[in-house]
Amino acid sequence: GAVVSQHPSWVICKSGTSVKIECRSLDFQATTMFWYRQFPKQSLMLMATSNEGSKATYEQGVEKDKFLINHASLTLSTLTVTSAHPEDSSFYICSADGGGRGEFGTDTQYFGPGTRLTVL
Amino acid sequence: GNSVTQMEGPVTLSEEAFLTINCTYTATGYPSLFWYVQYPGEGLQLLLKATKADDKGSNKGFEATYRKETTSFHLEKGSVQVSDSAVYFCALNSGYSTLTFGKGTMLLVSP
């Protein structure tokens, strides 16, 4: 249990277009999901915390108008990169608070496989 | 604030060698501690966790003990395999849901 999926796994788009990435908890409900960005050979940078039915909480320095997050249901959160530019190219990873599901119990985040975004 | 410090990599070992990846932390309160593993091009997989002092987390031959007196959570494995080659992240959760990650340590195991 506690499986998280992301779609798409990779996307290439032109500069100026918008891209939507989906994050789904497949076998559990997730009140809270998280979006991270990872640059090559670096650690994960938390972008925002997404709570079902309310506005996302963005980390300092993350543009909320550029990275739109929607958490409309207990199993789905989406990240939309608006007017993407080459500097937005990165590996985006989501996670979900397992809420006690999965072998590791409470207080545990389960991660999706990531989405590689390349903006030309 | 919270922080996690990991040993810099890459750590290069031969198959069947003993592995230690050091991790120390700074946190308020009593955090939960985690080790995640990331294989090339993939997301993170939770390897093991510990929630209180002296707890030992273990999984797939890896283990780590929560040492409050030294604020450490070192990852160990008695005999590594080529398939263990990946990046390992130490992380903590201080009770507010968000994770604080270390910078990651790359492990390279050769046959």
Image (cartoon, coloured by chain):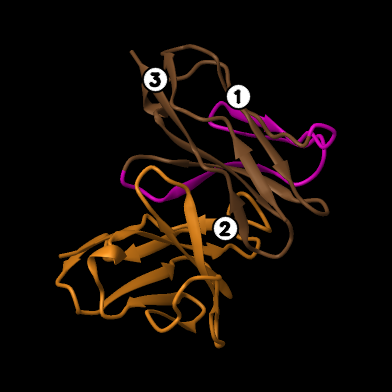
> Relative to A89, is B82 on the left or the right?
right
On the question of residue A1 being in view, the answer is no
Q: Which residue is mark 3?
A: B109
Q: Are marks 2 and 3 in contact (CB under 8 Å)?
A: no
Give the label on residue A109, or none: 2
Q: Are marks 3 and 1 in contact (CB under 8 Å)?
A: no
What is the chain letter for disc 2? A
* Amino acid marked by disc 2: Gln
> Relative to A99, is B83 on the left or the right?
left
Mark 2 against mark 3, which lies toward the viewer? 3
Q: Is residue B43 magenta?
A: yes
Q: Which residue is mark 1?
A: B76
* Amino acid marked by disc 3: Val
On the question of residue A67 being in view, the answer is yes
Q: Position of residue A50 (x, y in %)?
A: 53, 76
> Chain B appears in which tint?
brown
Task: Pick whichever, B103 or B42, lies toward us.
Answer: B103
- At label 2, counting other C-alpha atoms closer than 10 Å, the crowd grade (few under 14, some 14-19, many 20 or more) is many
Q: What residue sits 52% from the left and 42% below the top?
A: B103
Q: Is residue A19 magenta?
A: no
The quadrant the C terminus of chain A occupies is: bottom left
Q: CA distance from mark 2 to mark 3?
A: 28 Å
Q: What residue sits 26% from the left and 65% below the top?
A: A8
Chain identifier matching the orange colour in the rendered picture: A
Above or below B26: residue B29: below
Q: Position of residue B80 (x, y in %)?
A: 47, 19
Give the label on residue B54, or none: none
Q: What residue sits 71% from the left and 65% below the top?
A: B96
Name which quarter of the figure residue A67 lies in: bottom left
The magenta segment is B41-70
